[in-house]
Amino acid sequence: MASNQEESQENNKVTWTNEMTHTLLKCIIVEKQSKDEGNRFFNLSQKENIVKKLNEQFGIEMSWKHAKNRWDYLKKFYNMYKMNPENPRLGTNFFEYVAQLDEIFGDY
């Protein structure tokens, strides 16, 4: 069962900035490098590291759920980009993240 602090964090709305998204991706790259080969999922410690870095750097209170939602959003648009880089649904901001996403997904 989630603690009151975890529930409070999950109920907070997070407005993602470009800097926050870049930091999330940098954290994912670092944690991905420390994962076991063949394991595509983050363990609890890695999730905590990602959230801690974001919270400390930006003075916010977010949970893994917030980071995971943003990560899922980026993966969705990255898949759209890989199928059709000219897709009109890809906003111009998305292209700022392509190099980092290529680094993350390069070996999947």
Image: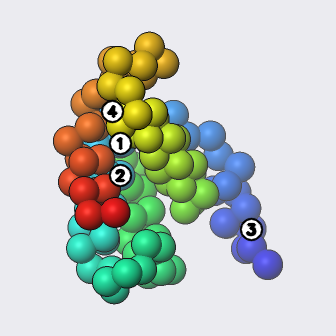
In the image, 29: left or right of 62?
A: left
Q: Earlier in the sequence, mark 1 or mark 3?
A: 3
Residue 36's quadrant in the figure?
A: bottom left
Q: Is residue 15 above or below residue 89?
A: below
Disc 2: which residue = 24
In the image, 11: left or right of 88?
A: right
Q: Residue at x 74, y 73 (%)?
A: 2
Disc 1: which residue = 20
Q: Secondary structure at mark 2?
A: helix
Q: Are marks 4 and 1 in contact (CB under 8 Å)?
A: yes
Q: Residues within 10 Å of mark 2 (few under 14, many from 20)?
A: many
Q: Are marks 1 and 2 in contact (CB under 8 Å)?
A: yes
Q: Is residue 89 above or below residue 11?
A: above
Could you tell me how far apart the alpha carbons at marks 3 and 4 are, in whole angstroms?
29 Å
Q: Residue at x 31, y 70 (%)?
A: 32
Residue 1's quadrant in the figure?
A: bottom right
Q: Give coordinates of residue 28: x percent, y percent.
A: 33, 61
